[in-house]
Structure formats: C-alpha cells, structure tokens
Amino acid sequence: MQLAGEMIPVITAVISGGSAAIAAIIVAVIQSRSQHKGVIAEIDKRDALQAQRIEQLEKKMDKHNQLIERTYKVEEAVKLIEKDIKVVNHRIDDLEHK
C-alpha cells in the first residue's frame, strides 16, 4: 500500500492542474464572448453609418438627376424659341423688303 500513498500527491497535483486548466478555459471563453459582442457592436455602428451615408448620397443623386431633367427641358425650350426667332426674323425681313 505504500505505492498508493505515494500516488495521492500526484493525483492531487493532476486534479489541481486540471481544475486550473478548466478555469483558464472558462475565463478564455467568457473573454472571447465579450470581445465578440464588442466587435459585433462596432460592426453594427459602422453599418448604420454607411446606411446613413448611402441615404445622403441617394438624395444628392436624386437632386442631380432632377437638375439634369430640368436642364434637358430648358434646352428643348431654347431650341423651340430659337426656331421661333428665326421664323419671326424671316417674316420681318419679308415685310421690310416688300
């Protein structure tokens, strides 16, 4: 039985070491979860900011597109006015030369 008595300190040491390792693993898992939550929160903040920036750019793009549409309409109106001016000038010339 002398052998069993000598093994008790070894078994105690193994159990103590195993308990410490398990505690270290648990602490690591808890820290990892905490860090994971922090990373997710940071990603959510960035996503919200990017969504806001995209919305602002869409509004600017809408304004730009409206300006382009109005410019096109103005150009068409100018063409018609120029055509009318040519007709009026031609009539004036005809009246002056009668």
Image (cartoon, helix red, strand yellow):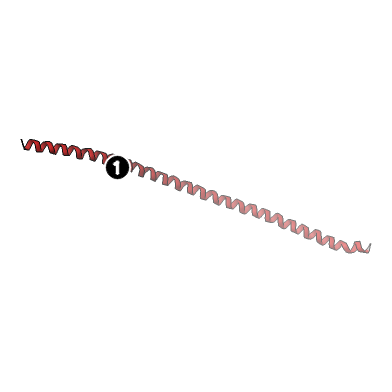
Quarter occupied by residue 35: bottom right
| Quadrant of res 11 | bottom right
| Amino acid of disc 1 | Thr
6 on left or right of 36: right
**Which residue is drawn at the image coordinates 61% and 52% (left, top)?**
36
What's the residue at 54%, 48% (across, down)? Answer: 44
Residue at point 55%, 52% (across, down): 42
Q: Nearer the viewer, residue 80 or 18?
A: 80
- Residue 21's spot in the image, x, y percent? 74, 58
Tell whether 85 sits left or right of 96: right
Q: Which residue is mark 1?
A: 71
Q: Quadrant of the C terminus?
A: top left
Which of 64 and 20 lies nearest the eye of the viewer?
A: 64
Badge count? 1
Between 42 and 65, the one nearer to me in the picture = 65
Q: Is residue 12 left or right of residue 46?
A: right
**Residue 38 x/y as whole percent:** 59, 52
In the rendered view, tell whether residue 73 sits above or below residue 42.
Answer: above
Residue 93 vs 25, above or below: the answer is above
Q: Is residue 41 above or below residue 94?
A: below
Estimate the x, y position of residue 56 in percent, counting from the top left: 42, 46
